[in-house]
Image (cartoon, rainbow, N blue to C red):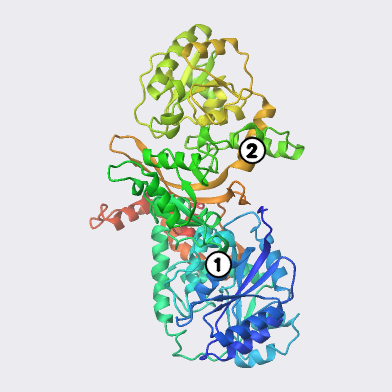
Amino acid sequence: MATNNKALNELSIIIPFRADDQRQYLVKRLRAFCDEFEQRCGIEYLLVDSGSSLMARKENKTRCTSAGIRYLYHESMGQVFSIGMARDYGVQHATGKLITFLDIDLIPTYNFAEQLLEFAELSGMSSELKRFFVLPCLYLSEYGTEQFLKKEKKTRHREYLYKHTMGDKLQIDNMAYCSSVMVVHRFHYLSIGGHRALFKGHGYEDFELIHRLSMEEGRTPRSFHYYTDTKSWDSNTFDGFRAHFSLLGIPALKDGLCTVHLWHPRPANTTYTKNIKKNHLNAFASFKQFDNDGCHPPALLPATLIENKVLYFGVPETNAGECLRNLVPHLGQFVYHSEYHFNDEHGRFSVSLLEAQIRSQKIKCILFSNPYANPIRLAVYHWARENNFPFYCFERGALTDSWFVDDTGFSVDSTRYNESYWQTPLSTEQCSSVTEYIQNTLDSEQALEHKGERKTKIMLVNSLKTSGKKVLFVPFQDPNDTVIKHFSGSIQSIDKFAIQIDRAAKKLIAYGWHVICKKHPLETVTPALKYARWVDDDIHLLDLLDLADAVALINSSVGVYSMMMEKPCYIFGEAFYAHPKLNKPVNSANELVDDLRDDSFKVCAETMRCFIHYLWDNYYSYGIPLSDSRVEKDGSKNTITKGIAFYRINIPEQAHYLYKKPKGEKISLNAPLLARYAHDILQREKPIKKMLRNRDKWKFKTWFKPQSRAGKHFKKIILHPKAYCLDSKYAWLNYLANKI
């Protein structure tokens, strides 16, 4: 369950509104609308009055206050009414964990808020940050609207859903299976930037947002010819974006959740409706742009943090900036600068320039992605620590998917690893949960950046020929890593470390030890070793730890996994996880050999569980990195993190949002959810299945050009159909791969 250290409402219902001379019926609707809601603890109602006249404003505020609806005025008078901007403004001021929107023309079901919360729990929103759903909307005719408003509130929605099912065309115009009434986690909404500002007036602004939300969630099968607008919600062919969006609203409809749209006149030439064609074009351009680059609008800020300015050394809309997107709504408004802006005319760091910038821009905090990245940034970092100026350090953590946001320092120089934070006895429940987490971590295929197919211990013993010998495992690190450059202690460098390890390996031969080393996955060059042995890159880190009797390293994060396996770990450098009950410091090959011969050091399991529980549950944030690899000029490999999909955020003394890691489950094309499209999907599968059955009969003609793009695709379909289907961006082809 998502939690926060601050009391929040469960749900905020945001109502965008503008009193418009061209649409006089709206004020009358507002009066009736305010009577639709019953006050309930944990539910917040907000009316965002965007650009109404001063006189209308006063009346609207009075009416909302008397109805228990929170009133907000959004300054947009004289501008074309943007319902997306009004909704975003409401989200920024909302206090609910979840948010939804309700236009003034929509009538919600009886006990609307309770139904939404129940369905949110049912659909898994309490455990997954990106999970969301939308509500269908039943559009009534003018006559249907008159009759509907006379009906009993408790039963009228069910009655009109029945009429729709029975084909009543007199009172019902149509059913839209997807509407702007969406239920989303507020901080997820803020982090993806809400609506795009390019949409003005009426239409398509909600579709563009729903497209991004759906692609982020990644659970719903994508329809054929997705960039097509069929203009209809009633088609039985799985074509166009509306077919895809229908899948988002049908589950709520089956649970009896929907809204009813009241009929109103539709003047053709109002400022609100004249942009609809332009919005239509903008929507499809935005669909394609997001599918291509995955870029959202800038993150939105809660109203409480708009004045909280955070100095960040970087450039907006870059990979580094995208990695922080989910943190922005928790920290404040980012002010981007290069650290070199604070150099004087001689190229030296100037404290006066830094302090002047902080005063002029009213900076409240500094965020360092890596304070040791360069001398100027390091100088600013030292200044902040010496002057007790608020700051945070952000960097990758030691555990899989982990990241830290630390307000006291970076790695070894942080005080957040002090025993006072974690050396307390665990409850039975805590002990059980951390033990389960450790076991799951050690059974996983993932461990930091160290990949490879898992193998059994016996397989490794046989392949490495270590039978009858003790094994010392030595994970090497990136020589350019910050913790090597600044926290390697007396060992100083990777090359000097390699010399000590080889000396130890020579001496350990006589005592029945075998020393195996694994290079860092991003390195292409390894130090020369005579007595120690390099193992293949594809051997999994956790399998090597399982094989090992002991571990030696400088300060690699592998030390954390070593303690989880309760393997003795000998540290040559400075490590944040160093503790006398968990590992042992050494300075030379002789010390290492003596300690291994003595064989008296044992990891304290109870202390280890306390430390891991602290890292896992209290200190680290968790997010799935979105990465690319590249080869540098010197031949070394580098991983570029283009973004982080956080599912758990821990910021000291502030936010604690805990969700489960997304399972990556996708809805099958065979699911009953797609029943109305089943025949169409089946018909589309038949030609491909026939082609696959007959693929051995195909002969390449002389006109076939295998080097062309189409030719390569065709050749792959014929020769490797399963791979082609798995690699496709279309969900129905991914599904079909399992049947080949």
Q: For the view shown, which residue lies furthest in the left direction? A: 702
Q: Is residue 43 visible?
A: yes
Q: Position of residue 584 (x, y in %)?
A: 57, 20
Q: Relative to the observer, which residue lies in front, 521 or 612? A: 612
Quadrant in the rendering for residue 115: bottom right
Q: Position of residue 653 (x, y in %)?
A: 62, 48
Measure the C-alpha gap from mark 2 to mark 1: 49 Å
Could you tell me residue 287's position as x and y percent? 42, 66
Q: In the drawing, what numbered circle is on residue 269? A: none
Residue wearing tag 2: 614
* Residue drawn at x 54%, y 51% as measured from the top left: 646
> Which residue corresponds to mark 1?
678
Callout 1: few (<14), some (14-19), or many (20+) C-alpha neighbours within 10 Å? some
SS of the residue under disc 2: helix
In front: mark 2 or mark 1? 2
Residue 721 in view (yes/no): no
Q: Are marks 2 and 1 in contact (CB under 8 Å)?
A: no
Q: Is residue 211 left or right of residue 609?
A: left
- Identified by mark 1, the residue type is Ala
Residue beneath the point at 69% across and 88% down: 149
Q: Which of 707/436 is in front?
A: 436
Q: Quadrant of residue 559?
A: top right
Lateral position of residue 33 relative to residue 238, left or right: right
Image vertical order of residue 656 relative to residue 49, above or below: above
Task: Identify which amino acid the numbered label 2 is placed on.
Answer: Tyr
Q: Say whether disc 2 or disc 1 marks the residue closer to the N-terminus.
A: 2
| Element carrying mark 1 | helix
Please state the horizontal and vertical placement of residue 687, each as a whole percent of the image.
43, 63
Residue 700 or 530: which is nearer the viewer?
530
